Image: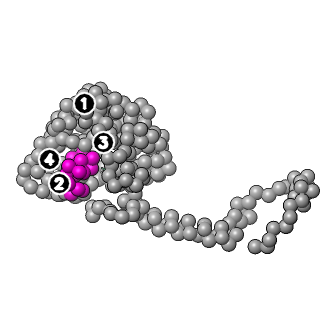
Amino acid sequence: MAKRITTRKLVQMKQAGERIAMITAYDYPIARLLDEAGVHMLLVGDSLGMVVQGHDSTIPVTLDHMVYHASLVSRAAERALVVADLPFLTYQVSAEQALQSAARLMQEGGAHAVKLEGGGEMAHTVRRLVDSGIPVMGHLGLTPQSVHALGGFTVQGRTRNAAERLLADAMALEEAGAFSLVLEMVPAEVAGLIRRKLTIPVIGIGAGPDCDGQVLVFHDMMGLTSGYIPRHNKVYAQLADVIRQAAAAYCTEVAEGTFPGDGQTIRLKPEEREALRDLLEEAPATPAR
Ligand code: KIV
């Protein structure tokens, strides 16, 4: 069995200039494939609210949902570090609340680490989690749980003030003990500055190439998302077309009666047929197809 990626290994990768690949995962079969493909971290993101549950934000996602999906992913991941999001308002009330929520993600969900959104104002909570043995990943820039306060899914850190605030928040999270940081929708120059100032890995999404690693949302990168797709996304496969074509072929074969064919059909052995002969002969002939 492959050796598990650890938070220490991720810091070593940053030091060695090796880039880190993270992808979101929400269920067992996909997590298994991503793990086999060599993805370093699987993020059970609360983006599942949008790409799996069909909501228009991450806000409706509950801790129970996250625990459930984390348990599916962690069961599949043999090598990747599994990070699970703390969903909206399950950690902002108090450090104690955060501790209890994170405990569920790890004990019931099997996650190895948790991610939370927010900067300096979350430093005390991050410290409390880290002191309790819970690895924490920060998340700055566009923080989707604050989409209504931010006024939409917009780029953050464009002005001097905003860039300085981002840097201060990033440093506060590192100081509080976070093992890594996601930077979402931040200009590449600002992300690069933050990466150089921090010793912990900075994982970008819409933050340009000058990060220690990248993360993409599985459904976006595999062409499974309908509707709005962020500009920073790259589509690596058009799975929607593959699935649509396969389902249409199945519908055609069912309609034509060519599925199931001989290969997918279970038949009685001659002696079994003989034993059922009178019963089978009782049924009226079906109309010819
Ligand atoms: O929930 C999520 O998928 C995320 C990524 C966009 C980083 O937080």
Question: Which kind of residue does numbered mark 4 sit on?
Answer: Leu
Residue 257 spot, x, y in % from top left:
70, 69
Q: Nearer the viewer, mark 3 or mark 4?
A: 3
Residue 27 — which label?
none
Task: Indicate left or right for 126 with 26 as reference.
Answer: left
| Mark with earlier residue (4, 1) | 1
Task: Report which quarter residue 269 is drawn in.
Answer: bottom right
Task: Indicate left or right for 134 with 34 as reference.
Answer: left
> Which residue in the structure is indicated by mark 3?
88
Residue 39 spot, x, y in % from top left:
38, 50
Q: CA distance from mark 4 to mark 2?
A: 9 Å
In the picture, the quarter occupied by the C terminus is: bottom right
Residue name at image x 80 percent, y 58 percent:
267
> Which residue in the structure is indicated by mark 4?
166
Q: Are marks 2 and 3 in contact (CB under 8 Å)?
A: no
Question: Which kind of residue does numbered mark 1 sit on?
Answer: Ser
> Which residue in the structure is indicated by mark 2?
156
Task: Indicate left or right for 8 with 271 as reference.
Answer: left
Question: Which kind of residue does numbered mark 2 sit on?
Answer: Gln
Q: Are marks 1 and 2 in contact (CB under 8 Å)?
A: no
- Circle 2: element type: loop
- Circle 1: element type: loop
Q: Are marks 4 and 1 in contact (CB under 8 Å)?
A: no
| Mark with earlier residue (1, 3) | 3
Residue span colored magenta: 139-154
> Would residue 7 be seen by someone viewing this image from the given angle?
no
> Which residue in the structure is indicated by mark 1?
94
Q: Nearer the viewer, mark 1 or mark 2?
A: 1
Question: Which kind of residue does numbered mark 3 sit on?
Answer: Phe
Q: Nearer the viewer, mark 2 or mark 3?
A: 3
